[in-house]
Image (cartoon, grey):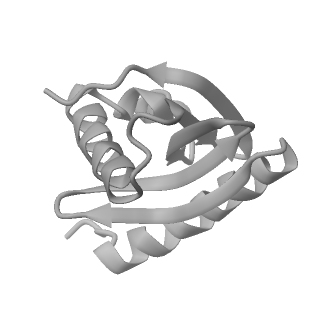
């Protein structure tokens, strides 16, 4: 039987790389507002401010490129889930109309970090 990683182990690994990405963003001058913002069926890994822009960040890690670039995993369905969670965050904080926002992806491939700003548009449908 092939070895399968448990959900708990995957979450632990994810947390390590999300913290690495948050540290990277802090070094770039971002202010981290939240990590692991969850609603029913979605999560935003990092919510940060860059100046006056609210940035929703998805973090993707791959040990190597055998399965493609990490950012490729942020498909349309994932973008829609992130967008719905972002809309809920904005509504819950009463800032829907008052702030610019964008969606970034931080991909970590091995030990290389690549920050893709404005990686996808708001996709709620």
Would residue 6 be seen by someone viewing this image from the given angle?
no
Choose between 125 and 13: the one closer to the eye.
125
Apparent side of residue 125 relative to residue 26 in the rendered image (left or right):
left
Apparent side of residue 123 relative to residue 106 in the rendered image (left or right):
left
**Quadrant (top left, top right, bottom left, bottom right) of the C terminus:** top left
Residue beneath the point at 30% across and 37% down: 83
Residue beneath the point at 41% across and 71% down: 11
Q: Which of the 4 quarters of the picture holds residue 104?
A: top right
Residue beneath the point at 73% across and 46% down: 111
Residue 88: % across, % down: 28, 51
Q: Is residue 115 above or below residue 108?
A: above
Choose between 15 and 50: the one closer to the eye.
50
Apparent side of residue 31 relative to residue 11 in the rendered image (left or right):
right
Residue 59: % across, % down: 52, 47
Apparent side of residue 123 relative to residue 86 in the rendered image (left or right):
left
Residue beneath the point at 36% across and 33% down: 74
The residue furthest bottom is 8
Residue 8: % across, % down: 36, 79
Q: Which of the 4 quarters of the picture holds residue 81?
A: top left
Q: Is residue 82 above or below residue 35?
A: above
The residue furthest left is 125
Would residue 106 be seen by someone viewing this image from the given angle?
yes
Give the total of numbered labels. 0
Q: Is residue 16 above or below residue 49?
A: below
Choose between 46 and 93: the one closer to the eye.
93
**Quadrant (top left, top right, bottom left, bottom right) of the N terminus:** bottom left
Residue 68: % across, % down: 44, 27
């Amino acid at each position: 039987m092939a070895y399968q990683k448990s959900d708990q182990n995957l979450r632990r690994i994810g947390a390590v790389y999300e913290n690495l990405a948050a540290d990277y963003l802090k070094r770039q001058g971002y202010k981290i507002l939240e990590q692991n913002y969850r609603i029913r069926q979605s999560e935003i890994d990092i919510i940060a401010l860059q100046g006056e822009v609210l940035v929703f960040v998805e973090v993707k890690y791959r040990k190597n490129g055998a399965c493609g670039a990490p950012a490729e995993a942020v498909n349309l369905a994932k973008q829609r889930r992130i967008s719905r969670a972002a809309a809920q965050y904005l509504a819950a904080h009463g800032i829907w109309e008052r702030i610019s926002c964008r969606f970034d992806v931080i991909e970590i491939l091995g030990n290389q970090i690549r920050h893709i700003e404005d990686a996808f548009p708001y996709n709620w449908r």
